[in-house]
Amino acid sequence: MDAFTAGILQRIKKAESERDRAREEGDEFGVEVEQEELDDLRRLAADHGVEVGARSGV
């Protein structure tokens, strides 16, 4: 796995964790922010041929 792939997957995992934490805390704005970040990261990964496992959305 190259550095780009490892980095993007790590960022996706972190954004998923942050989104889930925001959801648990009832922070709707935080959920939206992290979901947008996830959407952007997944789009970037797809553009570069990096496969990302699906997780639950909003």
Image: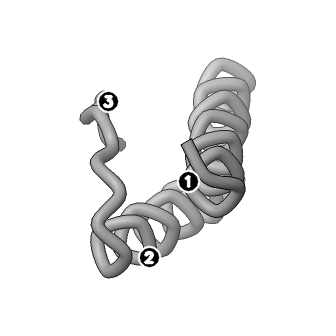
Residue 37 in which image quadrant: bottom right
The reply to whether residue 54 is in sight is: yes
Image quarter in which the N terminus is found: top right
Which residue occupies the foreground of this view, 30 or 49? 49
Q: What element carries label 1?
A: helix
Residue ID at (25%, 35%): 54
**Spatial distance from mark 1 to mark 3, Cα to Cα?**
18 Å
Question: Tag 3's secondary structure?
Answer: loop
Q: Position of residue 56 (x, y in %)?
A: 30, 30
User: Distance between the Cα atoms at labels 2 and 3?
Assistant: 17 Å
> Most extreme residue toward the top, as rendered?
24
Q: Mark 2: few, some, or many residues within 10 Å (few <14, many ≥20)?
A: few
Report the mark closest to the observer, 2 or 1. 1
For label 1, the residue is 5
* Residues tagged 2 and 3 counted as in contact (Cβ below 8 A): no
**Residue at 65% over, 19% down:** 24
Choose the circle earlier in sequence order: 1 or 3: 1
Crowd band around label 3 with a 10 angstrom C-alpha radius: few (<14), some (14–19), many (20+)? few
Mark 1 residue type: Thr
Front in this rendered view, residue 4 or 30: 4
- Up the image or down, 17 lies above or below 6; here it is above
Q: Can residue 28 be seen in this view?
A: no
Against 33, residue 57 (above or below) is above
Q: Quick check: 28 above or below 24? A: below
Mark 2 or 3, nearer chain start: 2
Q: Which amino acid is tagged 2? A: Leu
**Cβ–Cβ under 8 Å for marks 2 and 1:** no
Q: Mark 3 points at which residue?
A: 55
Q: Mark 2 points at which residue?
A: 44
Q: Where is residue 19 in the image (x, y as percent from the top left)?
A: 62, 39
Report the residue at 67% width, 28% height from top: 17
